[in-house]
Image (spheres, helix red, strand yellow):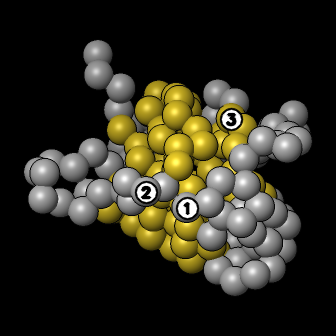
């Protein structure tokens, strides 16, 4: 089920998502479409070519609810620690930032998918859930 969405303009071809803390300087994309650490993910996107559409989903409660686009390619699938239970999405310059509460602090499973992985990505779907215990 979609819980949030935002359009973000980026000057540089990198979109960050994850904890509301500072993004570690060691998180470098190099030539990969996305890279993650324990708290953040950096995703390569199309810069200065228009808005980047970002949609945030939780697991669907019913099969008929809207979910992430199945044609998108997964660029990150792993766990992130959200120190305050909120996920932040924004440009690398931190000029634009969107924050959404996902629950209590802790570990979340995050899947990030892009319409066109790499420098042509203009839409990102993020699915975030609590890992099963």
Residue 91 in view in this figure: no
Q: Is residue 54 above or below residue 39?
A: below
Name of the residue lying farthest toward the top: 133
Q: Earlier in the sequence, mark 3 or mark 2?
A: 3
Residue 107, above or below 110 = above
Secondary structure under tag 2 reads loop
SS category of the residue bearing label 3: strand
Q: Is residue 56 left or right of residue 58?
A: right
**Residue at position x 52%, y 28% in the image:** 79
- Quadrant of the image occupied by residue 35: top right
Quick one: label 3, few (<14), some, or many (20+) residues within 10 Å?
A: many
Residue 104 on image: x %, y %? 38, 37
Q: Nearer the viewer, residue 53 or 93?
A: 53
Counting residues from the N terminus, which is met first, the one under dot 1 or under dot 2? 2
Disc 1 versus disc 3: nearer the observer:
1
- Rounded to the nearest angstrom, the CA distance separating label 1 from label 2 is 7 Å
* Secondary structure of residue under mark 1: loop
Q: Which residue is mark 3?
A: 36
Give the position of the N terminus as an image quadrant. Answer: bottom left
Give residue 121's quadrant in the image: bottom right
Please name whichever residue, 99 or 124, is drawn nearer the observer in this view of the structure: 124
Residue at the image point whose x is 64% and y is 80% from the top:
51
Residue denoted by label 1: 115
Kindly check if marks 3 and 2 are in contact, taking CB atoms under 8 A apart as contact. Answer: no
| Mark identifier at residue 71 | 2
Q: Mark 3 or mark 2: which is in front?
A: 2
Position of residue 109 in the picture relative to residue 27 (left or right): left
Answer with the quarter of the image where residue 120 lies: bottom right
Number of other residues with Cα within 10 Å of mark 2, as a class: few under 14, some 14 to 19, many 20 or more: few
């Amino acid at each position: 089920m979609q819980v949030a969405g935002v359009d973000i303009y980026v000057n540089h071809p990198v979109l960050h998502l994850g904890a509301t803390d500072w993004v570690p300087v060691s998180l470098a994309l190099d030539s990969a479409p996305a890279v993650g650490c324990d708290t953040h993910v950096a995703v390569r996107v199309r810069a200065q070519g228009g808005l980047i559409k970002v949609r945030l989903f939780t697991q669907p409660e019913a099969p008929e609810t809207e979910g992430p686009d199945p044609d998108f390619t997964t660029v990150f699938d792993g766990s992130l620690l959200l120190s305050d239970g909120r996920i932040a999405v924004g440009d690398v310059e931190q000029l634009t930032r969107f924050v959404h509460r996902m629950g209590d602090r802790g570990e979340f499973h995050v899947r990030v998918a892009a319409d066109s992985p790499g420098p042509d990505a203009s839409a990102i779907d993020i699915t975030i859930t609590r890992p099963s215990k």
